[in-house]
């Protein structure tokens, strides 16, 4: 059965350690990206040998955490690895509860999810990666922003992945920073999702975009899309989100090949 692809960002939080061999000594998805990955690693290595102030700014962390992140980045080429789905520990991945999913759904996640990364370009959940820190919107000396560097490469990789998946539907759950790293025109249909709170504001009901819990809310959505094999928003009509959000078809808009949908709740 054809399965739509689901695009996710990585997480800022990452598990340390690992027991797998170095990333380039084992099979990886998107093997054509191995060379470009080495280019980004080389640029990151060079940047990590700069001043503490420059490293802290580039990594987007305070000085106390910059040293730890710097050490991880300098060791990327040889560090032990673990599957990306285990490496990423942010709220989206916690909400996904991958390890507790039924085997069939886990396999669906492995097959359908593509994770965008400033360092790796794109990876699958089972791809072994080391600990690292690099935002898609950072600026690496000599290379520039990873999003700009990766865009043509990720676009080609996504075009191939879409062809292999035998469906042209992509659920794009990326934040703007990561969405800038690919050309969505390679997909026949892109579905973007907003979570909205229906609240009273100045005496009137209004819809407010959820920002703080956005990643948490997407975790349950990913599971539902995979479990039910959805390639159309209409399949969300009976989706009972654990946080009370419901699909509202009246808010669906389509521009070109992009369909924007909304899940709404009352607070």
Image (spheres, rainbow, N blue to C red):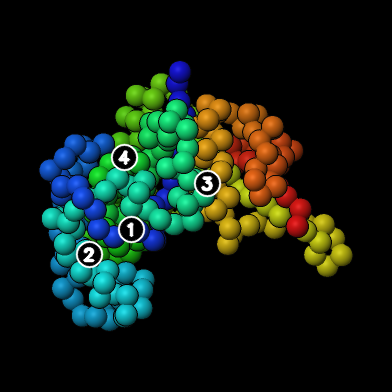
Whichever of callouts 1 and 3 sits on the residue coming sooner in the sequence is 1
- Report the residue marked by disc 4: 126
- Image quadrant where one finds the C terminus: bottom right
- Determine the secondary structure under disc 2: helix
Question: Mark 3: few, some, or many residues within 10 Å (few <14, many ≥20)?
Answer: some
Q: Residue at x 52, y 26 (%)?
A: 229
Residue found farthest to the top: 1
Return the x and y of residue 2 as percentages of the image width and height. 45, 21
Locate residue 29: give its quadrant.
top left
C-alpha gap between disc 1 and disc 4: 15 Å
Question: Mark 4: few, some, or many residues within 10 Å (few <14, many ≥20)?
Answer: some
Above or below for 259 versus 131: above
- Determine the secondary structure under disc 1: loop
Residues tagged 3 and 4 counted as in contact (Cβ below 8 A)? no
Q: Which residue is drawn at 56% across and 43% down?
A: 220
Whichever of callouts 1 and 4 sits on the residue coming sooner in the sequence is 1
Residues tagged 2 and 4 counted as in contact (Cβ below 8 A)? no
Return the x and y of residue 217 as percentages of the image width and height. 58, 50
Whichever of callouts 2 and 1 sits on the residue coming sooner in the sequence is 1
C-alpha gap between disc 1 and disc 3: 18 Å
89, 134: nearer the viewer = 89
Question: Mark 1: few, some, or many residues within 10 Å (few <14, many ≥20)?
Answer: some
Query: In the shown orientation, is residue 155 left or right of residue 140?
Result: right
- Report the residue marked by disc 1: 15
- Report the residue marked by disc 3: 219
Labelled disc at residue 36: none
Return the x and y of residue 78 as percentages of the image width and height. 13, 55
- Report the residue marked by disc 2: 72
C-alpha gap between disc 3 and disc 2: 27 Å
- Image quadrant where one finds the N terminus: top left
Question: Mark 2: few, some, or many residues within 10 Å (few <14, many ≥20)?
Answer: some
């Amino acid at each position: 059965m054809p399965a739509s692809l689901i695009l996710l960002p990585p997480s800022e939080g990452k598990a340390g350690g690992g027991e797998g061999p170095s990333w380039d000594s084992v099979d990886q998805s998107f093997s054509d990206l191995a060379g470009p990955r080495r280019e980004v690693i080389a640029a990151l290595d060079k940047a990590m040998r700069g001043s503490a102030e420059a490293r802290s700014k580039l990594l987007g962390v305070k000085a106390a955490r910059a040293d730890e992140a710097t050490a991880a980045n300098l060791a990327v080429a040889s560090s032990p690895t673990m599957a990306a789905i285990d490496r990423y520990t942010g709220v989206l991945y916690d909400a996904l509860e991958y390890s507790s999913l039924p085997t069939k759904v886990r396999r669906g996640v492995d097959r359908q999810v593509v994770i965008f990364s400033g360092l790796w370009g794109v990876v699958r959940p089972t791809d072994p990666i080391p600990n690292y820190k690099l935002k898609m919107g950072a600026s690496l000396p000599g290379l520039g922003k990873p999003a700009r560097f990766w865009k043509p490469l990720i676009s080609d990789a996504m075009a191939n992945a879409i062809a292999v998946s035998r469906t042209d539907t992509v659920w794009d759950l990326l934040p703007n920073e990561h969405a800038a790293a690919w050309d969505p025109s390679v997909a026949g249909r892109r579905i973007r999702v907003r979570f909205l709170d229906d609240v009273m504001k100045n005496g009137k009901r209004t819809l407010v975009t959820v920002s703080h819990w956005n990643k948490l809310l997407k975790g349950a959505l990913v599971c539902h899309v995979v479990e039910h094999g959805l390639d159309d928003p209409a399949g969300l009509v009976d989706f009972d989100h654990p946080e009370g959000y419901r699909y509202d078809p009246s808010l669906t808009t389509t521009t070109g090949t992009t369909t924007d949908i909304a899940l709404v709740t009352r607070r």
